[in-house]
Image (spheres, coloured by chain):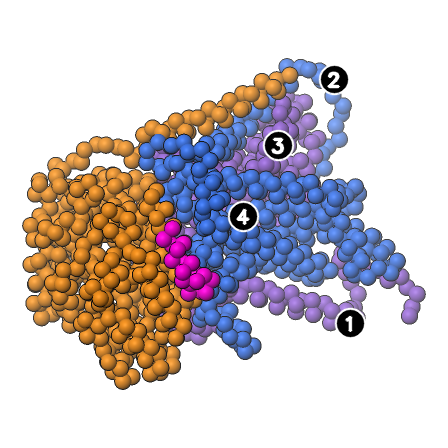
């Protein structure tokens, strides 16, 4: 054996100093890829299967295991998207989009403002309030669910989108506030100090200096609050009982209820359409996202 | 302080600020500007504070009050003292069932999410090309885990004629419906929750990246094997993240609603095997409209969760090591 | 320092918010809008009408709606539908929110839950004003639409009843007899047990019996009991329920019925998608009004198999049938009562509508329309068989029972749940009976 010191492989070094991989290293690398890809395939299989099932003719939807549809057809999509008296998916998609967009706006509004205060400003009770913020992260929503429903009932907001959207503007999703606080804390203070000296007010500093630099956290917040709002099922189920207001999750649930085995094709088609935007947006912006999470969780 | 060895993100690193001249006049410590800043701060906080009072604290107190009443949305709330709690703890076999089901669900989900995502993070951290692509793909299930679409597919996948049975049938294993059998139905939900481990994976990956590599090198030189390296380097460094992840995963598991609702067709069946606490609370509160009882259930959950959190924080002293760097 | 004061202020704010909330709870709610219904007014605008059913019924209902809209061009009727269990869950949520559709379809078994909670409009005034003509409905049938306060809350339109639907072709090919009027539960047990042997693999003889509350009701009525007694308490003895569940268990363990797991997986399935409709099951107890559409589905899957319908089994005290009367109500929060009343009147009385709907949700209680359908040569054999069966059952003087609140909770949910425990062998029949009765009585007491 040689007397060389054996160093653990350093990830970066492989790119900085590429050398011809030895045989065993190649095999190890390939097998690592193989294992990872197999795991991925198994994990993503339910989704792959769902997409494939949605492209199969109705009679063959259930029962086939294969990821490749034998007689691909877009019939299910056509049927699912055709509004009938009972189901109107194009409407539901619009509704979901509206609610999700408003939720994003609300979360961005609340989280940037609140995070700026916690990350950059001093004020009495700051520590107490921050502790309260953290505590709300651990608070189960069940404990506010019933009175919130009663409150919205009293306000005559039932059967509108208001109960789903207004709380976001008031910072109801503390996770995004927390995320943004951690991020802003990581920004150097020199720029705002300079601006303050120049007489710039807090709002100016916020708007012109901090906000532009917070884009990664804003992107993360926007992405995730869109996803949460899009997938939200309990909220719409509680507050919306007129079908023309329904969101996509409710539409899917109604679809399962009101039909039997043989229309699973259309159901899977609509289910695929309901997850496609999420996956699409996510993959398109994933670099921004995962950095946002990774850097903010640990400070 | 060690820098992370991979580019954290060009956008995350703000540009170098210009060199500054010192201020010409020292700022007064207790000046009028300070008050203005306090006001400004509270102005920024107004939306959140408003929400805190009206949407969080107010309802919390209201539900505490309601938990001592009988309230069915029609007519006034009638004070009945501890009756709801008594009924819940001593007279309601369904409540006991839902508590037990939830404890099993949380008790199985949380460790499996943590273990699976940690193992995978460690595996991926060894260095692999296309890491960011793999990471993104592994993340996808967690985007969809709480969705109705996936729950519907899950119900099919684990049904009697579902693809899971078809897959294991290829190995000669036969089984009936997994979601129709009360002995196995809950486990399909646990699997679903574990399947959506993407977020914890990403956080573990980031945490592993922060561990200084010279420690590993030194340990290897000293002859430590993989297990030793894990136990004495990786694990201690990760304990804050394990703690953070564990707590969030636990809270999230206690709040799980949509999968249980869809997979059990809204009822928690078969035989209440999927009657998670949230689902039972929903049934009692919003289907039967026994809102006082549902509020009592919610507060009990809060107390239990606060207890678990308290114990976790207390125990953290003994096993969570906050690193000296960063 | 400001902290103690600010702290107190925060606490005060939170407390005030809470108090305001609580005070509001004890006051009015959106349900208490007590404007008297506006009976004057034109038939115009739009109304929502909700019903339960599967795809076949949805089509027929839609056809009736279109007929009405053709006759009243200024009117739009929005149809909303769901399957049986979901329908009631949703309705109760809407009732509590004061958001019921203008015309919720209701049934005598669940009427009390809504009528007693002031969610429905009393209809006596509407009838007096002539907006709805009920002269062709027999008075005792009309009475099934009354609440506990004696007011009329539901205009009945269809009387449904459980029946035994069976695949005659499958039975005779397997060398089995077919049920005749007056058969009893023992005969049924023998029949399906023999069928379990005689039928080829892949075919099942019967559904899981013990989980269906209507079957228990038939059993109890055959013993001279019922689900409720006259005072609104449970009307059956523990022994009756024990015998019933033991009966079901015998059949299940003998392999004559569908398994518990598959039954649970198929909850809420439309009958047109059931195994009977797919030609893989021999018999199914189900409301007879589905016979025609199930036959239609069956014909689409396999050739030449005929379904027949028989009444429920008899017991020592007589025929075990009872009538489930469905009808249309007007919600208390409806803002377009004249149009709703006009639609109900149309649905009940219009002959063309009756022909198109073809008694899909029970035999017409409108005596003339019923006879029209029976006499109409275009009515399918299956439908005629059902209507004539209805006449037979009506002639047997089946008991009418007033259902108090809680039918859904007690029988649709709790009853099924306890039997599931038994069927999955997690509880003995005796334990399940005891606990079910305890829970049902607690529910009734609330």
SS state under label 4: helix
SS state under label 1: helix
In the image, the chain rendered in orange is C
Q: Nearer the viewer, mark 4 or mark 3?
A: 4
For the residues beneath circles 2 and 1, the answer to whether they share a chain is: no
For the residues labelled 2 and 1, say whether their Cβ atoms are less than 8 Å apart: no
- Measure the alpha-carbon separation of dots 3 and 2: 30 Å
In the image, the chain rendered in purple is A
Which one is earlier in the sequence, the residue at label 1 or at label 3?
Answer: 1
For the residues beneath circles 1 and 3, the answer to whether they share a chain is: yes
Q: Nearer the viewer, mark 2 or mark 1?
A: 1
- Measure the alpha-carbon separation of dots 4 and 2: 53 Å
Q: Nearer the viewer, residue A109 or C63?
A: C63
- Measure the alpha-carbon separation of dots 4 and 3: 24 Å
Residue identifier under label 3: A130
Q: Chain B is which colour?
A: blue
- A299 vs C294, left or right, is right
Q: Could you say where residue A245 lies in the image, as x and y percent from the top left?
A: 35, 46
Q: Bin the neighbour count of mark 2 within 10 Å (Cα to Cα): few under 14, some 14-19, many 20 and up.
A: few
Please name the residue shown 15% across and 70% down the image. C385
Q: Nearer the viewer, mark 4 or mark 2?
A: 4
Q: Nearer the viewer, residue A165 or A147?
A: A147
Which one is earlier in the sequence, the residue at label 4 or at label 2?
Answer: 2
SS state under label 2: loop
Chain holding disc 2: B
Q: Is residue C97 above or below residue C187?
A: above
For the residues beneath circles 3 and 2, the answer to whether they share a chain is: no
Q: Could you say where residue A109 lies in the image, as x and y percent from the top left?
A: 52, 35
Q: Kindly tell me whether residue C115 is visible in this rendering.
A: yes
Which span is picked out in magenta? C421-438
C147 part of magenta stretch: no
């Amino acid at each position: 054996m040689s007397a060389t010191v054996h160093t653990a492989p350093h990830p970066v070094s492989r790119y900085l100093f590429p050398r011809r991989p030895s045989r065993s290293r190649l095999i190890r690398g390939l097998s690592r890829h193989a294992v990872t890809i197999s795991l991925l395939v198994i994990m993503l299989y339910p989704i792959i299967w769902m997409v494939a099932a949605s492209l199969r003719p109705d009679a063959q939807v259930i029962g086939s295991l294969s990821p490749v549809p034998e007689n691909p057809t877009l019939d299910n999509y056509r049927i699912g998207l055709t509004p009938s008296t009972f189901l109107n998916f194009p409407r539901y998609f619009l509704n979901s989009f509206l609610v999700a967009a408003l939720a994003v706006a609300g979360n961005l509004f609340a989280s940037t403002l609140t995070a700026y205060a916690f990350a950059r400003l001093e004020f009495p009770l700051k520590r107490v309030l921050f502790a309260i913020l953290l505590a709300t992260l651990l608070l189960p929503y069940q404990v506010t669910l019933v009175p919130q429903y009663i409150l919205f009932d009293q306000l005559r907001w039932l059967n509108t989108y208001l109960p789903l959207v207004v709380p976001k503007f008031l910072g109801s999703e503390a996770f995004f506030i927390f995320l943004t606080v951690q991020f802003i804390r990581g920004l150097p203070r020199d720029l705002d100090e300079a601006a303050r000296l120049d007489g710039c007010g807090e709002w100016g500093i916020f708007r012109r200096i901090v906000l532009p630099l917070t884009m990664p956290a804003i992107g993360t917040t926007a992405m995730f609050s869109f996803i949460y709002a899009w997938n939200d099922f309990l909220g719409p189920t509680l507050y919306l009982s007129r079908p023309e207001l329904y969101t996509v999750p409710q539409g899917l649930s109604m679809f399962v209820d009101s039909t039997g085995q043989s229309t699973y094709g259309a159901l899977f088609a609509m289910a695929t359409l309901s997850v496609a935007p999420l996956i699409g947006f996510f993959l398109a912006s994933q670099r921004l996202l995962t950095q946002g999470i990774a850097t903010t969780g640990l400070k | 302080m060690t820098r992370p060895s991979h580019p954290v993100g060009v956008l995350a690193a703000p540009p170098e600020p210009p060199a500054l001249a010192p201020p010409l006049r020292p700022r007064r410590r207790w000046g009028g500007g300070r008050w203005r800043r306090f006001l400004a701060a509270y102005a920024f906080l107004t939306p959140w504070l408003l929400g805190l009072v009206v949407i969080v604290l107010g309802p919390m107190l209201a539900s505490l009050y309601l938990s001592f009443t009988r309230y069915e949305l029609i007519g006034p709330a009638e004070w009945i003292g501890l009756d709801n709690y008594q009924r819940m703890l001593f007279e309601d076999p369904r409540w006991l069932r839902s508590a037990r089901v939830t404890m099993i669900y949380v008790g199985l989900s949380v460790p499996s999410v943590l273990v699976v995502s940690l193992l995978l993070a460690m595996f991926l951290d060894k260095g692999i090309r296309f890491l960011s692509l793999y990471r993104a793909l592994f993340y996808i299930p967690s985007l969809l885990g709480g969705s109705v679409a996936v729950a519907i597919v899950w119900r099919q996948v684990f049904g009697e004629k579902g693809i899971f049975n078809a897959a294991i049938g290829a190995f000669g294993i036969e089984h009936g419906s997994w979601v129709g059998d009360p002995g196995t139905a809950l486990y399909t939900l646990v699997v679903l929750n574990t399947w959506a481990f993407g977020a914890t994976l990403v956080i573990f990956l980031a945490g592993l990246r922060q561990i200084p590599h010279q420690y590993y090198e030194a340990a290897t030189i000293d002859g430590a094997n993989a297990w030793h390296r894990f136990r004495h380097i990786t694990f201690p460094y990760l304990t804050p993240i394990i703690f953070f992840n564990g707590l969030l995963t636990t809270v999230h598991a206690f709040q799980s609603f949509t999968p249980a609702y869809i997979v059990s067709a809204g009822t928690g069946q078969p035989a209440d095997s999927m009657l998670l606490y949230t689902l039972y609370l929903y049934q009692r509160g919003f289907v039967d409209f026994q809102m006082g009882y549902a509020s009592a259930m919610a507060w009990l959950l809060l107390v239990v969760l606060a207890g678990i959190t308290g114990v976790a924080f207390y125990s953290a002293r003994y096993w969570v090591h906050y690193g000296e760097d960063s | 320092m400001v902290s103690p004061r600010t702290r107190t202020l925060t606490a005060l704010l939170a407390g005030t918010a809470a108090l305001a909330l609580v005070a509001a709870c004890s006051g009015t709610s959106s349900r208490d809008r007590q404007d008297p219904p506006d009976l004057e007014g034109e038939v115009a605008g739009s109304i929502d009408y909700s019903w339960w059913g599967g795809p076949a019924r949805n089509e027929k209902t839609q056809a009736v709606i279109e007929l009405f809209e053709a006759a009243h061009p200024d009117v739009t009727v929005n149809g909303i539908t769901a399957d049986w269990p979901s329908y009631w869950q949703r309705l109760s949520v809407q009732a509590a929110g004061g958001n019921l559709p203008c015309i919720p379809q209701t049934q005598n078994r669940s009427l009390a839950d809504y009528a007693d909670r002031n969610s429905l409009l009393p209809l006596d005034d509407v009838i007096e004003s002539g907006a709805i003509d009920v002269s062709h409905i027999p008075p005792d049938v009309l009475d099934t639409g009354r609440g506990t306060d004696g007011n009329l809350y539901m205009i009945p339109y269809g009387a449904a009843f459980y029946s035994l639907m069976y695949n005659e072709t499958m039975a005779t090919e397997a060398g089995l007899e077919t049920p005749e009027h007056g058969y009893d539960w023992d005969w049924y047990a023998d029949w399906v047990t023999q069928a379990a042997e005689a039928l080829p693999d892949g075919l099942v003889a019967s559904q899981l019996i013990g989980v269906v509350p209507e079957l228990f009701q038939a059993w109890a009525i055959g013993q001279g009991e019922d689900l409720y007694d006259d005072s609104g308490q449970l009307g059956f003895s523990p022994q009756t329920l024990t015998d019933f569940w033991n009966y079901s268990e015998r059949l299940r363990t003998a392999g004559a019925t569908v398994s518990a797991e598959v039954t649970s997986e198929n909850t809420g399935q439309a009958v047109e998608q059931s195994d009977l409709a797919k030609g893989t099951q021999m018999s199914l107890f189900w409301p007879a009004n589905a016979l025609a559409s199930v036959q239609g589905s069956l014909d689409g899957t396999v050739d030449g198999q005929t379904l027949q319908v028989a009444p429920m089994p008899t017991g020592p005290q007589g025929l075990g049938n009872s009538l489930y009367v469905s009808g249309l109500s007007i919600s208390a929060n409806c803002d377009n009562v004249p149009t709703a009343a006009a639609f109900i009147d149309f649905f009940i009385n219009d002959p063309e509508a009756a022909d198109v709907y073809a008694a899909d949700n029970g035999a017409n209680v409108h005596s003339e329309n019923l006879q029209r359908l029976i006499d109409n040569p275009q009515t399918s054999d299956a439908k005629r068989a059902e209507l004539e069966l209805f006449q037979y059952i009506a002639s047997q003087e089946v008991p009418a029972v007033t259902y108090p609140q809680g039918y859904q909770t007690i029988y649709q949910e709790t009853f099924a749940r306890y039997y599931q425990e038994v069927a999955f062998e997690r509880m003995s029949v005796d334990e399940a009976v005891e606990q079910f009765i305890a829970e049902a009585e607690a529910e009734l007491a609330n």
